Image: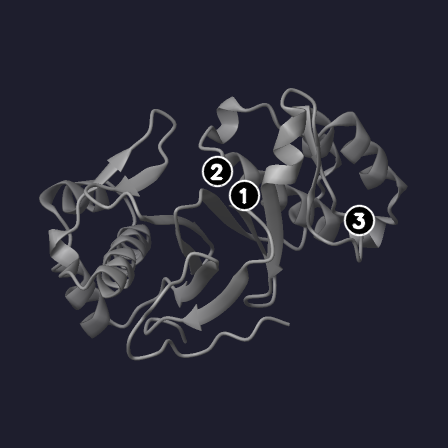
Amino acid sequence: MTVWSAPPAHLTLADDEVHVWRASLDAPQSRLQQLRECLTEDELSRANRFVFEKDRNHYVTARGQLRHILGAYLSQKPETLRFEYTSHGKPSLIGSQDLNFNLSHSGKLVLYAITRRRQLGIDIEWMRPDFSGIEIAEHYFSKNEVAVFRRLPENLRTDAFFTCWTRKEAYIKAIGEGLSCPLDTFDVAFAPGEAPRLLTNRTKPDEVARWSMHDFTTDQGYKAALCIEGSNLRVSTFQSPTSP
């Protein structure tokens, strides 16, 4: 069970650390306004393109909270931060080659992962209770993963599917390729009780030793995973001010 603690008053981040932050996307109106004020015109324009108010507010909360968190590490005002994106959409900070981050949101939650001098990816998914993943698994997962999935009892398949999916998503986000990397070219461990790890990469076999994986418990009905360069890292988990 993951313990989400209040962050320290002064944030420090060593080279062998990764910090994972949890936040609710349902911020109170006063906090929402505060977060909106630190966004750029481009971000506000993007927020306004959402049809539903809930989605607009969730975007503002996710982006504003990211700015506040990163600003705390850099001792900068959140509105001064600027981002750039790879061709596959992975964000990074302009002017800070040292601090790396990644974020993911689903349902009412968002997770942020922060580290130094390492690539990383994080993913969170809300598990629909009526979800049946066999067709999606057969379309996207590797043959080995589908074989594992098919051997599981029906009542364990939803949990196993999202365990597999979040670990695979975290990996492709960490390498910065997104869904341009075919999900069936690598295997992750995901059977019940199996520790999170990358098992094989058929196009880049040396990748297996490069990465480590971690799971997190957030709210009931969610799965979350982190993939990060290196091993034996110290992981701290913080609850942001927007959390319930």
Residue drawn at x 66%, y 36% as measured from the top left: 208
Residue drawn at x 67%, y 32% as measured from the top left: 136
Residue 26 appearing in the image: yes
Dot 3 corresponds to which residue?
191
Dot 2 corresponds to which residue?
173
Q: Mark 2 and mark 1: span between their CA atoms?
A: 5 Å
Dot 1 corresponds to which residue?
170
Residue drawn at x 78%, y 53% as measured from the top left: 194
Q: Residue furthest front?
A: 15
| Mark 2 vs 1: CB contact within 8 A | yes
Q: Look at label 2 and name its amino acid.
A: Lys
Between residue 84 and residue 96, name the one nearer to us: 96
Secondary structure under the numbered disc 2 in the rendered image: helix
Between residue 234 and residue 222, name the one nearer to us: 234
| Mark 2 vs 3: CB contact within 8 A | no
Above or below residue 229? Residue 28 is: below
